[in-house]
Image: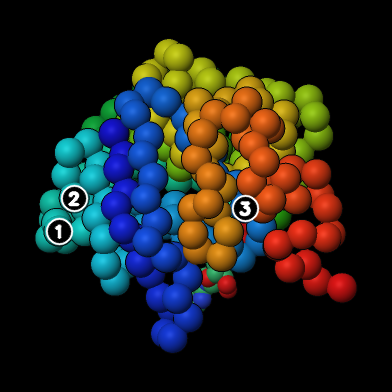
Amino acid sequence: MIKIENLNLSFGTRHILKDVNLNCDRGKTLVIIGTSGAGKSTILKCICGLLKPQSGAIWLDGQNILKLNKKELNKIRHKTGMVFQYSALFDYLTVFDNVAFGLRKNTKKSEEEIEKICMEKLTLLNLSHTRNSYPDELSGGMKKRVALARTLVLEPEVILYDEPTSGLDPITTGATNNLINFGKNHLNMTSVVVSHDLMTINNVADNVAFIHDGRIIFFGTYKELKESDNPYVVQFMHGYTEGPIKTIG
Ligand SMILES: Nc1ncnc2c1ncn2[C@@H]1O[C@H](COP(=O)(O)OP(=O)(O)OP(=O)(O)O)[C@@H](O)[C@H]1O
Ligand SMILES: [Mg+2]
C-alpha cells in the first residue's frame, strides 16, 4: 500500500531525509521510532502530501504521489488521514464540530448520519461528555483523542499517527492502541505510527523502522528489534547515554 523509495528531503541547506526506503503492506501497521529531530514527523508529512521531497518516490496504492498534479493529489489525499503530533484542532470550534469538520466538508452525509458517526467515535474514546467543549477547555490527552476521533470518522485507507499515545496514561494508551488495531482488523486500514511507547509498539506493530539522523538503520519486527545487536538500536532500546547516538549533556 505504501512504498517509499530513495526519499531525500532538505530544508534549505539542511539535509533531513537521506535515501529513505520503507514499505507497508495493505492492512498492516508500521511503527517508526527514532530520536527527537531524526525526521519521523517529516516522513509522515511527505506521505500525506504536506511536504514535497527533492527526490525519490512515494507509492500510495500503486501511484507515485510525487508525480501527480494538484487535482490528482487532492483525490488521493482523501485516502490518507493524519493524526498530528500536536493535535492541530480548530480552537474556535467545539469538540463535536472539530470531529464533524471533515465529514461536513468532504462528504454528502446528512447531519443525522454525521451525528451518529461522530458520537460513536467520541463515545469509543470516552469523550462524549465533551462534545460542546472548546479545545482550550480540554487536557492535552483529551485533545489528542479528539484529533484521533476527527481522523477516524473519515475512515481513510491509510492513517498516519504522529505520537498518538505520548503523554497519555497507561489505560488511555491501551484504549488508543485498541483503536489503532480496530482500524486495522475491522476496516483494513494501513497505519503508520510514530511512537516510542514500547507498549504501543508491542501491541500494534507488524514492522518497526528505526530512523537515525534521516536514515533508516533498522527495519524488522518488534521481536527482531528487541533481539537486534545493532549498536544504535541497543542504545535506544535501553536508553543508554553512552553509544553511537550522541546525547545532550
Ligand atoms: N518546516 C521546517 N523547516 C525547517 N526545518 C524543519 C522543518 N520541519 C522540521 N525541520 C527540521 O527537520 C528535522 C526533523 O524534524 P522532525 O519534526 O521530522 O523530527 P522528529 O523525528 O519528528 O522529532 P520529534 O521526536 O522531536 O517529534 C529537525 O531537525 C527539524 O528541526
Ligand atoms: Mg515529530
Question: Please, what is the three-letter code of the amino acid marked with disc 3?
Answer: Gly
Which quadrant is the N terminus positioned in?
Answer: top left
Q: Nearer the viewer, residue 2 or 226?
A: 226
Q: Nearer the viewer, residue 51 or 135?
A: 51
Left-right relation of 29 to 143? left
- The residue sitting at 71% across, 24% down in the picture is 174
**Residues at circles 1 and 2 in contact by the CB criterion of under 8 Å:** yes
Q: Residues within 10 Å of mark 1 (few under 14, many from 20)?
A: few
Callout 1: SS: helix
Question: Which of the pair 139/97 is nearer the observer?
Answer: 139
Label annotation for residue 191: none
Q: Is residue 202 above or below residue 39?
A: above
Is residue 244 something one can see in this rendering? yes
Q: Which residue occupies 69% across, 50% down?
A: 231
Q: Position of residue 135 (x, y in %)?
A: 65, 50
Q: Earlier in the sequence, mark 3 or mark 1?
A: 3
Where's residue 242, x and y in %?
83, 60
Write the residue at 42% across / 37% down: 159
Residue 100 at what x, y percent from top left? 44, 38
Position of 176 with respect to 29 (left or right) is right
Residue 208 found in image quarter: top right
Estimate how packed mark 2 is, as few (under 14), some (14 to 19) or many (20 or more) residues with alpha carbons within 10 Å.
Answer: some
Q: CA distance from mark 2 to mark 3?
A: 26 Å
Q: Residue furthest front?
A: 229
Disc 2 marks which amino acid? Asn
Residue identifier under label 3: 34
Residue beneath disc 2: 64
Residue under the image location 70 percent in, 62 percent down:
244
Where residue 156 appears, as percent x and y from the top left, is: 35, 33
Q: Is mark 3 within 8 Å of ligand 1?
A: yes
Report the disc number at residue 67: 1
